[in-house]
Amino acid sequence: MAQDLRARSAAEVFDDHLRLSGENRFEEDIERNVSPDCVVLERRGVFRGRDGVRELARFLAEEIPDARYTYTCRLAEGRVAFLEWTAEAAHTRVRDGADSYVIEDGWIMAQTIHYTVESTGATP
């Protein structure tokens, strides 16, 4: 019998989101874990729904292409989760990534994202 995705705990959704993201299975992650009504706050503004999440994923892929991500802190308590992360790419890096999540009914309902892209000084 298939798992009821909407019955998962926040921690289970968070773990699934990080696993699928880490495997570059972004579309599956969005369909399984992101609410159609999700709201994401990021330095560029407010992004809504799955299309907003897709747009933010495209920005990140352009800013740090083919990056290797490291999750330095993963916390989940009740309906809230927090992630600190770093990323290294050929010519750019992120050392201060921090995301927070509100997860309800098996969905990521809201997220905040912060990161600063730095040049590594390597010539393209």
Image (spheres, helix red, strand yellow):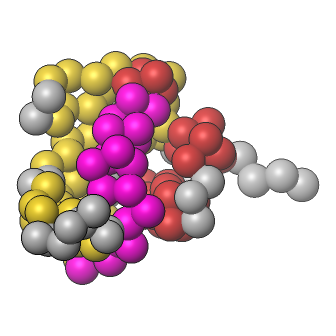
Given residues 63 and 122, the one toward you in this image is: 122
Q: Is residue 22 left or right of residue 64?
A: right
* Most distant residue in the front direction: 123
Using residue 66 as the reference point, say whether residue 96 is left or right of it.
left
Q: Is residue 70 magenta?
A: yes
Is residue 76 in view?
yes
Image vertical order of residue 12 relative to residue 62, above or below: below
Query: Is residue 57 inside the magenta stretch?
Result: yes
Q: Specify the quadrant of the image occupied by residue 84.
A: bottom left
Q: Is residue 49 above or below residue 65?
A: above
Q: How many marks?
A: 0
Q: Residue at left 89%, top 55%?
A: 1
Q: Residue 88 appears in which quarter of the rendering?
A: bottom left
Q: In this rendered view, identify the residue nearer to me: 106 or 92.
A: 92
Residue 31's spot in the image, x, y percent? 61, 36
**Which residue is rendered at x = 20% and y = 42% of the image?**
112
**Which residue lies at the image location 13% right of the left edge and 49% below the top edge?**
114
Question: Residue reaching furthest right?
Answer: 1
The quarter in which the C terminus is drawn is bottom left
Which span of residues is magenta-colored? 53-72
**Viewer can see residue 83:** no
Q: Residue at x 50, y 66 (%)?
A: 22
Residue 107 placement (x, y as % from top left)? 48, 39
In x, y percent, where is residue 6? 60, 41
Q: Nearer the viewer, residue 110 or 46?
A: 46
Q: In the picture provided, is 38 more to the left or to the right than 27?
A: left
- Vertical placement of residue 29 versus 19, above or below: above
Residue 70 image position (x, y, % from top left): 32, 77
